[in-house]
Amino acid sequence: MERFNPSSPQGKLVDTCLRAFCDSDQLAGLLQDESETKSVLRACGSPIIKLLLRLSDAIKNREGDFDLVIQRLDDLIALATEKFYAFPFKDVPPCWRDLFREASFLKFAAVAVKKSWVQQNGNLDLQPLSGEQMDEMVKTIDMALIMAGPPASSDSQEQIKSVFEFLQEIHIESIQAPEDYPLRKRRKLDKENNLWQDGFPKSEAFEPPVSNPISKWNEPSFDDFERHMLHPNDNDIGPEPVIVKGALNHWPARNNRPWKSPSYLLSKTIGGRRLVPIELGRSYVDEGWGQKIITFKEFMGHYILDPESSALATGYLAQHDLFAQIPSLREDITIPDYCFTSPPPPHRSSPLAEKHSKLAQLDEPLLNAWFGPAGTISPLHTDPYHNILSQVVGRKYVRLYAPKESEKLYARGVEDGGVDMGNTSALDIGVLAGWDGSEEEKMEAQERFPLFRKAEFVDCILEEGECLYIPVGWWHYVRSLSVSFSVSFWFN
């Protein structure tokens, strides 16, 4: 088989697609009764596996009707999606997640060789990928990662990482216009390349006053931080929150790979093509709150850089494992050493202490990204792990209540549909503190939650470059004062 410049990014991309994503031998092995191949995909049934095998062969050989192949793969993805909604998400049989991924990877490979397929000359003489092909390929594989999760195999994860790196290289080549490029097109390209060079917009968001400041430490040693957790000043409270300064100074995200640069973030997402799940609405407990999946470029353009350009609701990329999805961003940060201390168990005063104590010990911290405009709010809630909240870009107001204050904070409990919201308060801190809402809403909230006024709290403005240690079980309310990019590190 003739190949298209195998050393080029596109050549490497196609080779990975046909070699790894179109693994007909593995699919054929699943149809053998005596096969030693272990795969949950077999539970989908032999008719589905036979169809996957035929489609895989068609893509490798670029035979048959391209549009029909794509339609059959879309049908399989739709079938898997239906199964996602037929069960509670945690109970979806693993075979349907595998089918979603397998069909998506085959579709990705088919789109990658589409122009060669259309030629029907038997050669893999590829034309450069079009922008539409790039859009479809990124969308297909990102939807698989978001909806079905990454594959369990480390080899498969490396292959996915590789194809995104190849796509990134292809994108970079495509925006580097040659000298003989038509002047009109070069001007258009230069305009597009410079769209995102400015920083994030300045904010005039309301800044709550700090009433009970949290103490600050300048890069405490590992031993001093562990001692702070294990030997609290007040045993009736347990370890208390503390702000750590200087711990992020060495992060590339704060230096030569700056997350405060929109153009840099777009450059890490294949020109903004990567998909991200965002929350719509100021807070997840507000009426009308929702979720959707959009491109990173759309998220940046509509919700971050020009949030007032339309009547769109606030968009927030919240509690998303962005770093598993885009490993190159993970390389811009490091896990704080404090996450590897031996923290105490949940404090006895927490009503969730028993539940949180039963959680298995983490092998490594859980990382989540929080990226949004000024005004986003995480309502008062508590988490099952200790947390180092690291403020990479922007500023946030944070208010915290010790576990012993829980009875004054009105946990929601189990709500309609059997959803356990026991870790989230029914209080709207903004209304009760007098910052938000009408006078009528403020009075109604005070009458409905009379114990709240007796609850003791500490608060702070978490500045760019600072970390906030939040002990397990502490209730916290978080309000963005500017465009903000934070990373949480959960550990136990």
Image: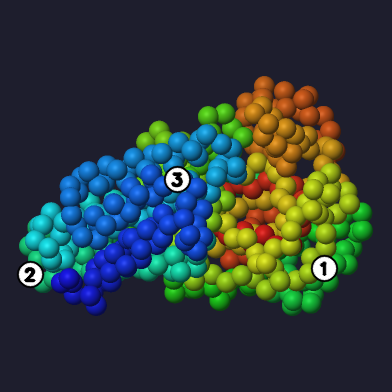
How far across and how far down the image is residue 424, in percent? 70, 40
State whether residue 414 is above or below residue 149. above
How far across and how far down the image is residue 490, in percent? 67, 59
Q: CA distance from mark 1 to mark 2?
A: 64 Å
Extreme-front residue of the structure: 34
How far across and how far down the image is residue 219, in percent? 69, 74
Of the numbered discs in the image, which one, if any, rests on residue 228? Answer: 1
> Relative to 86, is 139 on the left or the right?
left
Of the numbered discs in the image, which one, if any, rests on residue 180? Answer: 2
> Relative to 436, is 79 on the left or the right?
left
Q: What residue is pinned by disc 3?
A: 45
Viewer-nearest residue: 440 or 65: 65
Viewer-nearest residue: 243 or 121: 121
Q: Amino acid at mark 1?
A: His
Q: At 50% across and 63% down in the image, what residue appears?
A: 36
Q: At 33% across and 60% down in the image, what residue appears?
A: 24
Mark positioned earlier in the residue sequence (1 or 2): 2
State whether residue 60 is above or below residue 415. below
